[in-house]
Image (cartoon, rainbow, N blue to C red):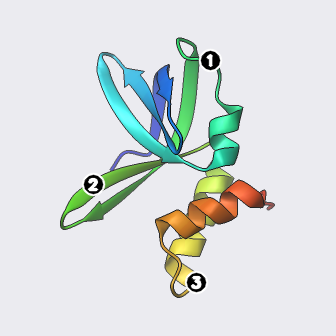
Amino acid sequence: MIGKLKGTLDEIDEDSCVIDVHGVGYVAHCSARTLASLPSPGEAVVLFIETYVREDMIRLYGFQTGLEREWFRLLMNNVQGVGAKVALAVLSTLAPTP
């Protein structure tokens, strides 16, 4: 599993970003809060990653901090009916606290 990406920010989209790590571009889906905190394209960036695997896809979710990633995991695993999109929406609105 991928746990962290450190590289150069290539681009920022509406709900994701692309990080170049030694020539390989990784798409990381992020909360609006995380996307707003990213540097300009071309600058160095580090994101904590949650790798989500289903039988029909593999998707990476990126977070500013390990705490934000942990809250994503808690929402996904412990709140019935909450999927990745809802968990990211919650994290876009509310800042996780220890």
- Of tags 2 and 1, the one toward the viewer is 1
Q: Which mark is residue 53?
A: none
Q: Residue lying farthest left?
A: 55
Screen quadrant of the C terminus: bottom right
- Calculate the distance from the C-alpha at mark 3 to the C-alpha at mark 1: 34 Å
Would you place residue 52 above or below residue 18 in this image? below
Q: Is residue 65 left or right of residue 51?
A: right
- Calculate the distance from the C-alpha at mark 2 to the C-alpha at mark 3: 22 Å
Q: Is residue 67 left or right of residue 57?
A: right
Residue occupying the point 67% across, 55% down: 67
Residue occupying the point 54% across, 37% down: 47
Residue at the disc numbered 1: 40
Mark 3 closeness class: few <14, some 14–19, many ≥20 residues within 10 Å: few
Mark 2 closeness class: few <14, some 14–19, many ≥20 residues within 10 Å: few
Which amino acid type is marked by label 2? Ile
Q: Of the two numbered discs 2 and 1 on the same chain, state the one appearing first in sequence.
A: 1
Residue at the disc numbered 2: 58
Q: Is residue 27 left or right of residue 73?
A: left
Would you place residue 90 above or below residue 8 in this image? below
Residue occupying the point 56% across, 30% down: 46
Residue 88 x %, y %: 58, 59
Residue 60 x %, y %: 39, 48
